Image (spheres, coloured by chain):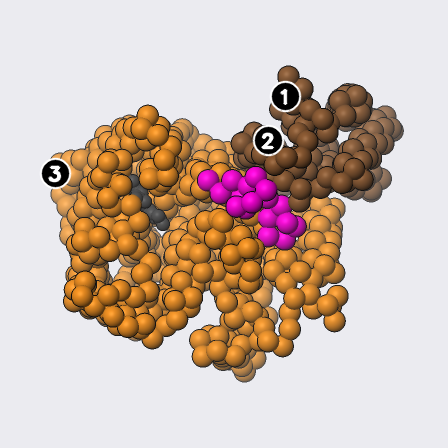
Amino acid sequence: MKFWFGKLTWASLPHEWFTIGGALSMVLAGLGIFVYLTYTKKWKWLWQEWLTSTDPKKIGIMYFVVAALMLVRGGLDAGMIWLQQSLASGSGGYLTADHFQQIFTAHGTIMIFFVTTGFLFGLMNYILPLQIGARDVAFPLLNTLSFWLYAAGALFINLFFFFGGEFAATGWLAMPPLSELEFSPGVGVDYWIWSLQISGLGSLLSGVNLLVTILKMRAPGMTLMKMPMFVWTCLGSLLLVVSTFPILTMTLLMLSLDRAFGMHFFTSNLGGNPMLYVNLIWSWGHPEVYILMLPAFGIYSEIVATFSRRRLFGYGSLVADALLISGLSMLVWLHHFFTMGAGANVNAFFGIMTGLIAIPTGVQIFNWLATLYKGDPRFTSAMHWFFGFVFTFTLGGMAGVMLGIPGLDFQLHNSLFLVAHFHTMVIGGALFGIFAAITYWFPKVTGFLLNEKWGKRAFWLWIAGFLVSFTPLYILGLMGVTRRLDHYDASRGWQGLFMVAGLGFIIICVAVCAQIWQIIVSIKERKQNQDQSGDPWDGRTLEWSTSSPPPVYNFAVIPEIKNRDAFWDMKVSGQVDKLVSGQANKQYEDIVMPKNTAVGIYISAFLFLVGFAFVWHIVWLGAVGFVGAVTCVIFRSFDHHTEFTIKSEDVAKMESRGLKEIWQLKQ
Amino acid sequence: MTEIFHQHQQENSFLGFWLYLMTDLIMFAALFASYIVLKNNNFNSPGGEELFNLSLVLFSTIVLLTSSFTCGLAGLYVEKRNVRATSFWLLLTLILGSFFLFLGYKELNNLVLEGYSWQTNAFLSAFFSLIILHGLHIAAGILWITVSFFQLRSFGLSDFVASKLRRLFLFWHFLDVVWIFIFTIVYLYAHI
Ligand code: HEM
Ligand SMILES: [Cu+2]
């Protein structure tokens, strides 16, 4: 038995209310989907059109689906955390301390790794190739593999509902020695490690893939300094991915070696050094926050330029900012543990570096404002998100600068002030950016616009909910409330503010409902909101020059780039009209595209098994998973018929349909 | 069309693979840093200067460097599209690589027989991890060479195979470089 099942026993199966609830709801959802697909006979369609697709546009959409599901999952955690903290004044609340700890660990991990990261990689998949005038990413197979590793990681983090019944109770970065076997003997930390290891590998591979895409696949004429700003900030972000995710991988590996093989990297005995872990994890962790933030900066740049109908003010300095931020963000990690006693000089150095990073960040904001000032701004809902971002981000940035002053940080470290800071940054910065991006690029993906009225309502609800939720946390933090409290003394008088924060949470829930409603309304009214031109906003960059949604091959004829804001340039110089009208007798070439492949799914499934085997110490399963994954790679390396050709006649047929519509519209 | 597509793809693959190697290098760097931090935490057990057998390590270093040389020769013959010579030098590389692995195994095994393992203390955890991680990379390289023989047999030295081989050579030389770091930071450092 031990051989076959390792540490798994009957007792590992769900038997508490939250594991039964979680497992049951997932089983029911799975069953529902299964029945639906079988009933409508859509399995084949799903498999061929979506799951095995190598089209980065489809992969991007799949990222969005998974990330949205995980947002709901992480949001449920947030609600439970808030309810506990509102109730637990002078009592134990409704959760045990241990369960509460598991919830905030899962919440943080999911929101960073599976929500924000998922949305951003989805966006990069969809938009990057279009913006650089490419038909695909550099390595299509690797791209599906990255997505499936991410999806496998997302599933893995929920697996504890079924097997084991506990997640890590250590906080989202699982600091040792708490996360070592001695103090966390259960499987929770192992689930944490392996879900990150699996999805982190996906991020790393995506990083390599998209970097090569940007560096090698740009349309002819698009020099680096002619790239759209979003591409630049993604480049900065991806450079950080490839230079810091390996550190995360190695650090997690060392922790798992401690736990699985009795090594002593970070243990509190036999010479282990927990502070080593803290340094390593933050030298990934701080860059990670900018990995999430930089693409959002790019989104805002695109939106501001488009809706001001003006070239970005200070493009060169924005490029420099993106690169400076990437560079500097690798030199500030120690500000996360000023209090650990590295000494005054070290703290001073990292304090100064932290202050410095605020400069390029601030310069960007002035660039955007100058673009608006010189342009002719339209206040669409995408712009609302931008203004919301400027407001919250400035707030959170100032809080960050306060935390970056070592003397002050001794007071504020690990208080709710810190929690308020980073939520301001991640929600008001990265998440608002994602929402802005959704509004902005939605018509490109679907061919119709999102309802503006509901978009603006959702925005106002979000910003109100956000402020009501997190302003109290700043105050509570200054009152000395530490983070991660599962209960507190009634005489402290904190409960009122916690309840206000809870009210904010409810407003945010309403805001999310408004967003969902926005999508429903827009789908209902899609006829009225249709955009056949492919360019609803009078856009500036290449993605707007294709039809909406773009054909599989993105561009029938790869455009020649002469200027920054390539599409705007074509419109101004009258090239677009020529393109559209002359297209009918234009000579197309054959287009080579990658075939679908399921190899990514298989490899991810095998690595999923490896993770499971590590959690439960099932040696044979680990061997099966490992050999399986390697075999897949080897088999694939013999296959050199991995692409197919779309004949030029077929391209012409597909194009004439779409282009005629555009042409009629222009008349 | 397809040829141009493939040519681009091979160029991309080379850059992509090189980037992957850089990420691998950073992974090793994190482990090296940990080793340096932990290397004096031997906790009453003997440290590196007593445990390491320099002459054995020097021998395995020479074996690995030689394999890099034979690997380089195989690379020359790939460019000349000479299947037989390529296979011959690849085979030699494979043998030398396996021999290197065997020597590494002996070294670690000797330590275990003397009663020291990765569980003994933090210093040995880092040491064993570093050597084993490098060894696993070598093992992956050996597997890759083996697969290459089959590819050479099925497809000859087509552009497709040649581009894969170029990446293999890059990988092998990279492992050599990492080993030089290990030799310096782990073994030499312990003796000065
Ligand atoms: C002006 C720029 C920023 C400065 C000066 C800054 C400064 C700081 C400092 C000093 C801390 C550590 C405080 C402590 O633990 O006592 C911190 C924590 C944090 N910051 Fe920022 N930050 C900045 C921007 C950002 C951005 C853009 C994000 C995210 C998108 C972010 C996310 C975080 C997170 C997640 C933590 C805490 C994580 C944890 O302890 O669990 N920060 N920041
Ligand atoms: Cu930081």
The answer to whether mark 1 and mark 2 are in CB contact below 8 A is: yes
Q: Residue at x 32, y 25 (%)?
A: A345
Q: Residue at x 63, y 57 (%)?
A: A614
Q: Residue at x 34, y 75 (%)?
A: A94
Q: Which residue is mark 1?
A: B189
The answer to whether mark 1 and mark 3 are in CB contact below 8 A is: no
Q: Are marks 1 and 2 on the same chain?
A: yes
Q: Residue at x 18, y 66 (%)?
A: A491
User: Callout 3: helix, strand or loop?
Assistant: helix
- Relative to residue A37, is residue A321 drawn left or right? left
User: Callout 1: helix, strand or loop?
Assistant: helix
Q: Ligand 1: which quarter?
A: top left
Chain A, chosen colour in render: orange
Residue A329 visible in the current orientation: no
The disc, 1 or 2, on the residue closer to the chain's N-terminal end is 2
Task: State the CA–CA distance, disc 1 to disc 2.
Answer: 10 Å
Q: Chain of mark 3?
A: A
Q: Are marks 1 and 3 on the same chain?
A: no
Chain B, chosen colour in render: brown
Residue that lies at the very extreme toward the front in this rendered image: B44
Q: Which residue is mark 3?
A: A373
| Label annotation for residue B39 | 2
Tell me the kind of residue under disc 3: Tyr
Q: Give the magenta range.
A: A257-275
- Percent of width and height locating residue A6: 69, 65
Task: State the CA–CA distance, disc 1 to disc 3.
Answer: 61 Å
Tell me the kind of residue under disc 1: Tyr
Does the magenta segment cover residue A73? no
Tell me the kind of residue under disc 2: Lys
Which residue occupies the foreground of this view, A426 or A596? Answer: A426
Which residue occupies the foreground of this view, A129 or A410? Answer: A410
Q: Pointer 3: residues within 10 angstroms few (<14), some, or many (20+)? A: few
